[in-house]
Amino acid sequence: MAWRSHGTSNATLIQHLTANALITTPRVASAMSSIDRAHFSPSAPYRDSPQSLGHGATISAPHMHANAAESLLPYLSPGARVLDIGSGSGYLTCVLAALVQPGGSVVGVEHIEALREMGERNAGKGELGSQWVGDGTVRFVRGDGRLGWAEGAPYDAIHVGAAAGGIAGVEGLVGQLKRPGRLFVPVEGDDGMQHIYVIDKDEDGNVTKKKEYGVQYVPLTDAPA
């Protein structure tokens, strides 16, 4: 249904994503409505398709951002701490911040300084994002996303916007989850195909991994030399 969800404004994009059941909860609809995608997408911001950001990075299609937010929603309560790895344009970082207010915080991690700066700059284009960057509710940092961001751990929820090279490669991120907590991450299998994994840690530290639908993301790697 994604191909039928394009909008001519942020409002119509959210309406179409909701009508096509790509957004399924009022909280996610409200959060995505509060963050104008035009501040984060270099072109055609209201098309339900990915857009290049340069530096080998993309801003994912809106339906993917909606699905990630819906999946993580049970762990996005007010006051929650969230890690957004591969924060790119900063769009989903701000949507996640909207979902954990009041009192929550989000750290966006990028491995290229120009992308880190882009996310911070884009967030500052909107009233909410500018406020959150100013008061530390949203932080954009440079680091190796494969290592997470230990400074703010543990996190209620972790989103990864690039494909890990195997399920074993996300164990360090699982270690930065709270009990309970959830990780949403694309993973490339031995066959070269990528799938979304939703990984939960319960109150006792037990971990379950659920393989979901196929995707195509840029790889989660270190910065180019």
Image (tube, rainbow, N blue to C red):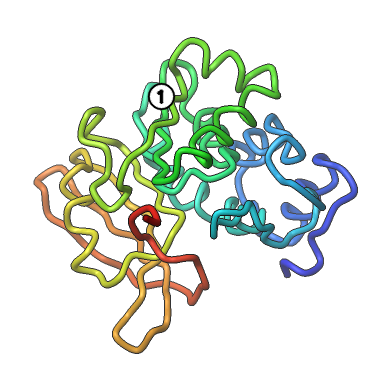
As drawn, is 51 to the left or to the right of 109? right
Q: Residue at x 62, y 34 (%)?
A: 31
Is residue 30 depicted above or below 22 in this figure?
Answer: above
Label 1 CA crowd tier, 10 Å (few <14, some 14–19, many 20+)? many
Is residue 113 depicted above or below 225 in this figure?
Answer: above
Is residue 5 depicted above or below 110 in this figure?
Answer: below
Residue 95, position in %: x, y?
57, 36
Residue 112, position in %: x, y?
44, 45
Q: Residue at x 48, y 65 (%)?
A: 218
For the residue labelled by badge 1, is the local secondary structure a helix, a strand or a loop?
Answer: strand
Q: Residue at x 60, y 45 (%)?
A: 25
Residue 213, position in %: x, y?
47, 74
Which amino acid lies under the numbered mark 1 shown in the image of this protein? Ser
Q: Residue at x 20, y 35 (%)?
A: 150
| Depth check, front residue: 43 or 28 | 43
Question: Which residue is under mark 1?
Answer: 105
As drawn, is 203 to the left or to the right of 56? left
| Depth check, front residue: 14 or 154 | 154
Residue extending farthest to the front is: 225
Residue 37, position in %: x, y?
72, 40
Quarter of the image where one finds residue 137: top left
Residue extending farthest to the top is: 135
* Screen quadrant of the N terminus: bottom right
Is residue 156 depicted above or below 169 in this figure?
Answer: above
Residue extending farthest to the bottom is: 191
